[in-house]
């Protein structure tokens, strides 16, 4: 009987060791098979905008190179934070990604104290894709030709300069507040549910000013309906080579350039993060992609995973400082 019991205990120990070994091996095998089912890419803004166009370009590339379906899903609201929260709660298995941007990642924690995720701890940065300076525009009916005109108008009448944004906490909002801080202008913020309705009101004269991505504005600028007063980046864009940067327009040190990149829930397998990073960087090297993104007002930036992590640390401090200033006013 003793021999039988000993044999049974030995068998149980052996089975336990076998199961432990299998548990260790299975995740590695799962990673080797990745991807073996569709991937979801969440765009936290409405369809048709710059972020959506970028997300669909990236989704198509990953679908072609990874040989699996990539479903682009627009999960909108609250300045991009609803979509970001959905990804933060998703399994970290390499099948859910976020088209991250300045608003829901670098700004949101300051403006939304009850945020459902931690921008630093909830996400694994995967790949930066590009940065895009904004353009400061006004309706031609205002008669403003320069940044100085805006500042002087606000001083004559503190209620005269209303500016629209795509919503509270969006880069359009924060850059407007950065402008107010840097110039001393008196501005009144009018939030909208996206850029397009704000641009419509700008053209209709209901608001006087906007800070937005050039792709949303170029046709109106070329048509003469809107007047470009300045660019928020460090250098002029080729598409608007006659429009000065904010520094050139007399605002020292002003540089506000929103970023766009791919992120995943924190804990995604490192091999998956590295593979997707390589695919995105290869995507960004294609001349046709560089040209298309330039048409969207974006300059491509290729980075490794650690480089993107360091980049977001710096951006987080810069944009959080600007958002904190906004909260005090």
Image (spheres, rainbow, N blue to C red):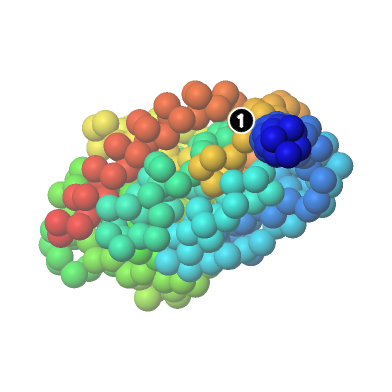
Query: In terms of image quadrants, where is residue 231?
Result: top left
Left-right relation of 273 to 56: left
Tell me the crowding category of disc 1: few under 14, some 14 to 19, or many 20 or more residues within 10 angstroms, Cα based. Answer: some
Quarter in which the C terminus is drawn: bottom left
Q: Nearer the viewer, residue 71 or 286?
A: 71
Q: Nearer the viewer, residue 51 or 111?
A: 111
Instruction: Please state the horizontal and vertical placement of residue 206, each as a whole percent of the image.
Output: 37, 75
Instruction: Please state the horizontal and vertical placement of residue 141, each as a whole percent of the image.
Output: 39, 67
Instruction: Please state the horizontal and vertical placement of residue 317, each as a whole percent of the image.
Output: 29, 37
Q: Nearer the viewer, residue 102 or 1?
A: 1
Relative to 210, say whether 16 is above or below.
Answer: above
Left-right relation of 69 to 107: right
Relative to 164, say whether 178 is above or below.
Answer: above
Q: Secondary structure at mark 1?
A: helix
Visible in this render: residue 141? no
Instruction: Please state the horizontal and vertical placement of residue 38, each as a whole percent of the image.
Output: 78, 53
Q: Residue at x 62, y 63 (%)?
A: 74
Give the total number of marks visible in the rendering.
1
Residue with the most extreme front position: 1
Visible in this render: residue 204? yes
Give the residue number, with chain letter if any, for mark 1: 270
Q: Residue at x 24, y 66 (%)?
A: 188
Query: In terms of image quadrants, where is residue 71?
Result: bottom right
Quarter in which the N terminus is drawn: top right
Left-right relation of 144 to 88: left
Q: Nearer the viewer, residue 33 or 42?
A: 33
Q: Residue at x 73, y 51 (%)?
A: 39
Q: Residue at x 64, y 51 (%)?
A: 96
Relative to 219, say whether 9 is above or below.
Answer: above
């Amino acid at each position: 009987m003793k021999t039988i019991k000993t044999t049974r205990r030995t068998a149980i120990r052996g089975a336990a060791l076998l199961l432990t070994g299998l548990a260790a091996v299975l995740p590695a095998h799962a990673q080797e098979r990745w991807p073996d089912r569709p991937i979801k890419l969440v765009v936290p803004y409405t369809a048709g905008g710059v972020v959506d166009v970028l997300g669909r370009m990236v989704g198509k590339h990953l679908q072609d190179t990874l040989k699996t379906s990539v479903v682009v899903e627009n999960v909108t609201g609250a300045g991009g934070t609803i979509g970001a929260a959905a990804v933060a709660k998703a399994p970290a298995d390499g099948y859910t990604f976020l088209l991250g941007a300045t608003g829901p990642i670098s700004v949101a924690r300051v403006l939304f104290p009850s945020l459902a995720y931690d921008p630093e701890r909830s996400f694994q940065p995967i790949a930066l894709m590009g940065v895009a300076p904004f353009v400061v525009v006004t309706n031609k009916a205002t008669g403003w030709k320069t940044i100085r005109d805006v500042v002087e108008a606000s001083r004559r009448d503190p209620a005269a300069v209303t500016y629209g944004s795509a919503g509270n906490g969006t880069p359009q909002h924060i850059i407007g507040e950065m402008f107010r801080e840097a110039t001393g202008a008196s501005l009144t913020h009018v939030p909208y549910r996206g850029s397009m309705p704000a641009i419509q009101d700008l053209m209709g004269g209901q608001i006087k000013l906007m800070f937005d991505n050039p792709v949303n504005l170029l046709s109106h600028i070329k048509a003469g309906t809107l007047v470009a007063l300045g660019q928020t980046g460090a250098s002029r864009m080729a598409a608007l080579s006659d429009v000065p940067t904010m520094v050139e327009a007399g605002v020292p040190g002003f540089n506000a350039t929103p970023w766009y990149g791919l992120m995943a829930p924190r804990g995604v397998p490192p091999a998956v993060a590295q593979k997707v990073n390589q695919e995105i960087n290869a995507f960004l090297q294609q001349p046709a992609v560089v040209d298309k993104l330039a048409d969207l007002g974006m300059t491509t930036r290729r980075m490794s995973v650690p480089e993107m992590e360091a980049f977001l640390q710096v951006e987080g401090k810069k944009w959080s400082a600007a958002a904190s200033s906004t909260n005090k006013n």
